[in-house]
Amino acid sequence: MNEPQKLSKDDVLNALLGLCVGDALGVPVEFLSRERLRQSPVTDMIGWGTHNQRSGTWSDDSSMAFCLADSLCEGYNLDDIARKFVGWYRDGLWTPYGNVFDIGIATSSALHKVAKGKNPLLSGGYGEEDNGNGSLMRTLPLVFYIRNLPIAERYRAVAEVSSITHAHIRSVFACFFYCEYALELLNRTEKQEALRLTQNRVNAFAEEFKVLDSDEQNLFQRILGLQHGPYADQPLPLLLEEQIASSGYVLHTLEASLWCLLTTDTYAQAVLKAVNLGKDTDTTGCVTGGLAGMYYGWQTIPESWTNLIARREDIVDLADRLYLAYSGTTR
């Protein structure tokens, strides 16, 4: 990765506003099938629907991302990050309207353990069945803390933060790849070239530090661009929609989000494509939206959407505080 460019206030707002708008677009249609959404696709910010929430309401995805960002404003402290997550889970911290209306089973279980005094490094599920997208959806603010760190330290921080709720290597590595790709976008790299550079860097890191065994590596084949196995001749951007899944499984969400960004030309196209894949619409929208916001800029998000976003001024203030915390060349 090239020398990180100077951080701007917009860089942070691009990520935070980008992810929550994508999230809010998906909230009303969460769990709907792709077939249903083909018949009646999402084309604008709407309300009510699945969770009976007004338009512009974001979900647990953005709430936890904002909790992470809020904690990082005071530096990196894993215990404080975990406390913020518990504050959301128990008391509605960083919710749109003071109540939690959506939470994953793995996240709920892990935060219950943290609330009871469990070490946050040991609270997350580490079984193969514990690979939902609950840590991927909230990890993006971490890029502003890790951007000047060596890659091994970046990996360690991502692994720690993921492990509060999702400790399996698959979830950790998915978050790591996502953050590494986001760092390329933060560095103003063109999105296709950013994928190539991220694949090269992450593959080299995984090989040097033996991060993945062969079975796990095969599962990341499309994401890592590995030239073996059934997808060797199908780069991620060339896959067809029927080859992209959109469930709550962490690899499905990561693949879908990268694909949506790489196969569209604007923020709106990317997030609408993500939401209309169906099923876990808020999270696919959120993860895609964070990347698309970083790439295209928050000013490209339709104003009619951002005007509806709950607590918009609080989000802008949070972005300003996070920028002030990490705007220096070193930290």
Image (cartoon, grey):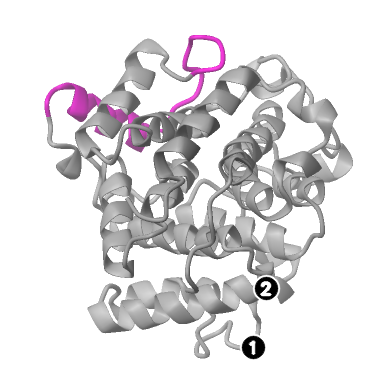
Q: Which kind of residue does numbered mark 2 sit on?
A: Gln
Query: Is residue 309 placed above or below 225 in the rendered structure?
Result: above
Query: Is residue 63 placed above or below 190 in the rendered structure?
Result: above
**Residue at coordinates 46% horizontally, 53% vertically from top-left?**
250
Q: Residue 282, image x and y in percent?
A: 61, 36
**Residue at coordinates 49% horizontally, 39% vertically from top-left?**
323
Q: Residue 134, image x and y in percent?
A: 42, 41
Query: Is residue 300 placed above or below 53 in the rendered structure?
Result: below
* Mark 2–mark 1 distance (CA, rounded to whole Å): 17 Å
Q: Which residue is mark 2?
A: 192
> Is 162 placed left or right of 19 in the picture?
left
- Label 2 SS: helix
Find out whether residue 33 is within the magenta segment.
Answer: no
Q: Which mark is residue 233?
A: 1
Residue 224 in sight: no
> Is 88 placed left or right of 3 in the picture?
left
- Foreground of the two, 305 or 243: 305
- Label 1 SS: loop
Instruction: Please state which of the two labelled residues, at mark 2 or mark 1, is closer to the viewer.
Output: 2
Label 1: how many Cα within 10 Å (few below 14, some 14–19, many 20+): few
Q: Residue 261, image x and y in percent?
A: 70, 59
